[in-house]
Amino acid sequence: MASATIKIFLVHGDPKRLRTAELSNWTGKAVGGPRSEFDGVLARDEADRSGVYFLTGADSETGEPAIYIGEAENIRDRIKAHLQKDFWNQIIFFTSKDENLTKAHIRYLEGKLIEQARSSGRAKVTNGQGSGARLPESDREDMEIFLEKINQLLPVLGIELLVPATSKAVATVERTQLYCDIKGLRAEGHLAPNGFVVLSGSQAVLAERASSQKWPWALNMRQRLRDDGVLVQVGDHLSFTKDMEFTSPSSAAAVIHGGHANGLTAWRNSEGKTLKEIEAE
């Protein structure tokens, strides 16, 4: 993505409440806020325009992040219909200041955004089905640029559910490939903007450590990953079937070790330096 200047306006001075966001040299605009300020969000003039919107929260059954992505020719009228959905607690919508977004445009954006959300694997997408629309080549290029700007603003506004879980950061230390070895097994991963990614094919011990009873997080996470098919038994060990992002190097190492582990010393580069030593350089 190209570099950008972002202007965020906190309507009440509180970053958790009603806010708007714009990018330099872009006709789009974002408006967002918590469900508790639903009326204030929809009272904005921008809510009378066409655009795409995001409702985010947690699935009531599993507790995992959940998201709904929609489009509307009138944001205000459409979003009122979602009050019957109780999973969401945040709303963000995008419109165009020049009011040139057509029905076909917003359907195209909606389809692309739903596809991104599903492929990222970060949240349950509550949309019943996908959307989308065919556009002339010139319009399609314009909407791809609009889509890029949406993706630049979403994380700044607190929605990272469309960011690929395995996205690599730019900093040199974050590009370093790291290894976690235990009992003849090896896991491979790298630092990422939101934590640490363990790569597909990495290995983990089959039996949990006694410490997992004292700190059951690792045990619970391992079971969840096994239930989801991310960790599967292969002979005398477990194997990752896909790239998996963790909140920290330690949480990743704990799953691999089957119990409490210090990620700063468990992860090493190809030269044997620990992550702690690498970060101290």
Image (tube, rainbow, N blue to C red):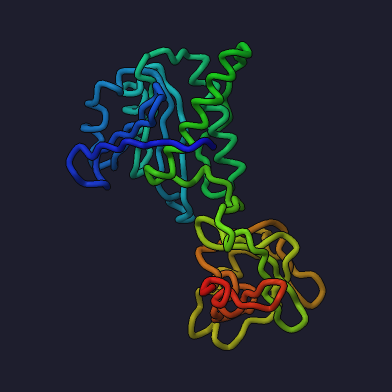
Residue 158 coordinates in the image, percent (x, y): 39, 46
Residue lying furthest bottom in this view?
Answer: 210
Q: Foreground: 278 or 16?
A: 278
Left or right, 233 with respect to 194, comes to right
Q: Foreground: 91 or 81?
A: 91
Question: Residue at point 43% right, 36% down?
Answer: 4
Left or right, 23 with respect to 212, comes to left
Quarter where residue 129 is shown? top right
Q: Is residue 236 above or below residue 21?
A: below
Q: Is residue 187 visible?
A: yes
Q: Foreground: 156 or 219?
A: 156
Q: Quadrant location of the C terminus? A: bottom right
Q: Is residue 129 above or below residue 271?
A: above
Question: Residue at point 77% right, 81% down?
Answer: 184
Quarter where residue 74 is shown? top left
Residue 36 coordinates in the image, percent (x, y): 24, 42
Question: Residue at point 52% right, 48% down?
Answer: 123
Residue 92 coordinates in the image, percent (x, y): 36, 35
Q: Is residue 227 visible?
A: no
Question: Residue at point 47% right, 31% down?
Answer: 149
Q: Quadrant location of the N terminus? A: top right
Q: Is residue 56 above or below residue 21?
A: below
Residue 214 coordinates in the image, percent (x, y): 49, 85
Q: Foreground: 144 or 89?
A: 144
